[in-house]
Image (spheres, helix red, strand yellow):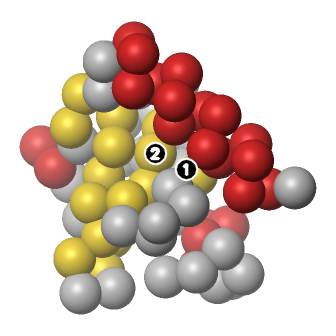
Amino acid sequence: MNPDDPLLALLACPLDKGPLSLLPEGGALYNPRLRLSYPIVDGIPQLLPSSGRKVSADDHERLLTRIEGSAL
């Protein structure tokens, strides 16, 4: 999955139904509101609630910086 993929605009977090951000390396989708990371396996986002991995506060700040940096 790449940042220009039109599917990205349609995907939403299964828990809060809000938008997800593609992490710069393209291996996961991130919900900064709930601090959950959802993996992308073989190009397919794993968006089951049980697939979300909780991200620590330090990792959250690092991910936000990387997401904002890749948007420039």
In the image, residue 21 lies at what x, y percent? Answer: 58, 52
Give the left or right position of residue 7, taking residue 53 as reference: right
Neighbour class for label 1 at 10 Å: few (<14), some, many (≥20)? many
Residue occupying the point 44% across, 55% down: 29
Residue occupying the point 27% across, 60% down: 39
Residue 30: which numbered mark, if any? 2
**Do tag 1 and tag 2 residues touch (Cβ < 8 Å)?**
yes
For this rendering, which residue is in front, 45 or 26? Answer: 26
Instruction: Tell me the element at label 1.
Output: loop
Q: Extreme top residue here?
A: 57
Residue 37: which numbered mark, if any? none
Residue occupying the point 64% across, 84% down: 5
Give the left or right position of residue 28, taking residue 25 as reference: left
Query: Type of residue at label 2?
Result: Tyr
Q: Quadrant of residue 56?
A: top left
Residue 20: which numbered mark, if any? 1
- The reply to whether residue 61 is in sight is yes
